[in-house]
Amino acid sequence: MKRWNIVLTGYGTVGKQVARLLGERRERYREKYSADVRLVGAARSTHAVYNSDGLDAQTLEALVQSGKAAKMKAGTEFLAASKADVLIETGPSQFETGGPGLAYIRQALEQGMHAISVSKGALVVDYAGLSRLAKQRGVMLKISGATAAALPTIDLLEYNLAGCEIATVEGIFTGTANFVLSSMMNEGMTCEQAIEQAQRMGIAEPDPSFDVDGWDTACKVTILANAAFGGQLKLTDVPKMSVRTVTPDQISGWKQAGLTPKLIGRIRKTEEGVTASVELTAVDAEHPFAGVNGTTKAIRVQTDVMGDLLVVGGKSDPVAAAAAALKDLEHILGQFR
Amino acid sequence: MKRWNIVLTGYGTVGKQVARLLGERRERYREKYSADVRLVGAARSTHAVYNSDGLDAQTLEALVQSGKAAKMKAGTEFLAASKADVLIETGPSQFETGGPGLAYIRQALEQGMHAISVSKGALVVDYAGLSRLAKQRGVMLKISGATAAALPTIDLLEYNLAGCEIATVEGIFTGTANFVLSSMMNEGMTCEQAIEQAQRMGIAEPDPSFDVDGWDTACKVTILANAAFGGQLKLTDVPKMSVRTVTPDQISGWKQAGLTPKLIGRIRKTEEGVTASVELTAVDAEHPFAGVNGTTKAIRVQTDVMGDLLVVGGKSDPVAAAAAALKDLEHILGQFR
């Protein structure tokens, strides 16, 4: 039985679900991969906890309740001392510098750990560098949790369609933006009303800008373009549109014309490489995205020899994000068993 | 650069496309997997050709034009002498005994070769035995080409949703049956007329029974239930319905009720294990399969923590089937690089 030590940075909403599912699935990992998987370390912004035999629920709870009680400082020394096999990074995203997430992932790969990122900041800022580093060290960098989580995106491009030439990718990658547009179309709300409802339902953040102004979709297409198409895109290379520009007049015009507005992330292969964009597009009733409503996400891919594929669904909650990270973990366990 | 020798049994419509794509993708395999992939052997029903350096197009053409000119006999000795690393089996399916396909796959696994099956017969008859054998020998048995090919099915259950509990799977797995039903609903044809049109278009076989009487779907759900859920189902355990039972009266009744008939393959996890069936079901307009028309296929999966996923599309031609087999090959190259 091979021992697999996991360390979790950014022990917040998603991190807690990762810890819970890791515990629930211990037996599965033993049976399926002959892997004794243990969460040995967890860090929040300033403090961390560690136990080489595996952390118990009380210790994790203590980290949340009073970081300082944990005594150990979060950061470089914590990660180095953890001697983990896999880092799972679920901290808050920082899109200009990559923040602590980028530092953790870089350090983990340098130390020969596999890395799974749920947060997007590090990947948006330096996917290419991290990917190169992982290759040099012979470890894996996995990103499902950062690229629409339970909706398969990077898997689809790299695994399900391995060997195909992919010409275009388009997707509804941000559930919140789709919820706002759907509410405007189907329930006659203004954009402000739809955002407020989304906030009341816990779908939108107090500051909704990241989701409704196209940033979230832009991050996802940037990462996917760089990861699946070898692109060198920066977030600033991706033109964006916002759901907040939509007026009631536009809504009634689209309704009359039988069109449905969608915030669509697009990736196109070009002769020079790859481009990406976030476009507010009114699709006709025949378009496969026309019926994708509420917080539901979708991806559509055009290939040379396998035809088109459309994938719709995948939950958007913290449990699903954690499950996506642990799917990545299983891929690592399967590859390095 | 690691050398990978491929042998192809059943060199027919799909086999030819496998050979062509293998040639076109040599550079890709070298770059991506450091793999020097060569097709060294190909067999038809009675004769075979072999060249340890790789087969050229003329030799393959000679095998098709006049099997006997190939001199080498197909069968056990041919496969043993090929010393291949991977068998790709694309021969005609034999659903009672597994036929030559089963013998080839069993022999390949016993000799320590990986096996990729596009044909269904061997898998329907003895998936469990072959899978056990592959595990014992430390090699892979891959089945994408036999389970809806370009539509991801086994990948979806085992890779994209790794770690999830899957409660139910349902799918439109047979493009021809869906084409016949769609033509009856949308173009007012009788079943016979729709089958004749499908035959003229090269979509249906001269004997359409395999596709329209539910056998093809039954084979696919049998294989998937056994492969993804550890089932022990035989083809005879799967109740089937046929598209040919549909009458014009039923069609007009469904139209009036806003329903759409679909031939749906279902897999359900039960407390005792797993069950599968092929059901002719009239779905309502809200059902995600209602809009899946013509030869288009689809699969829908319900999970515990990732929600529902729907996948629609994937071409159904011989090139797509070959591409699905070569996707499997890339998974092997990636795992054993």
Image (cartoon, coloured by chain):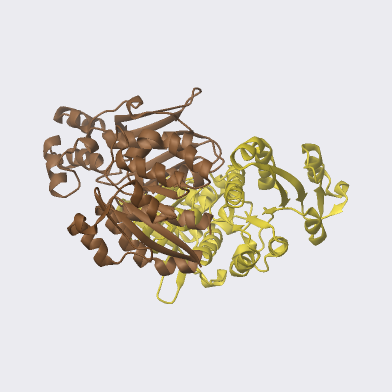
Chain colours: A yellow, B brown
Q: Is residue A103 above or below residue B317?
A: below
The residue that appears at 36% across and 65% down in the rendered structure is B54
Q: Is residue A247 left or right of residue A29?
A: left
Quarter in which the N terminus of chain A is drawn: top right
Taking the image as shown, residue A194 lies to the left or right of residue B286, namely: right
The one nearer the camera, B146 or A169, is B146
Q: Residue furthest top?
A: B272
Say whether residue A166 is left or right of residue A33: left
How many numbered circles does the render carry? 0
Residue B148 seen by the camera: no
Q: Residue A332 at x, y = what percent?
A: 60, 51
Of residue A116 and residue A47, the one placed in the foreground of this image is A116
In the figure, A32 relative to A227: above or below? above
B244 is higher (above) or lower (below) than A248: above
Q: Nearer the viewer, residue A273 or A304?
A: A304
**Image spot of residue B229 (x, y percent):** 48, 34
The residue sitting at 27% across, 66% down in the picture is B57
| B334 on left or right of B48 | right
Inspect this view and state whether residue B135 appears. yes
Q: Position of residue A158 (x, y in %)?
A: 48, 58
Q: Position of residue B79 (x, y in %)?
A: 36, 51
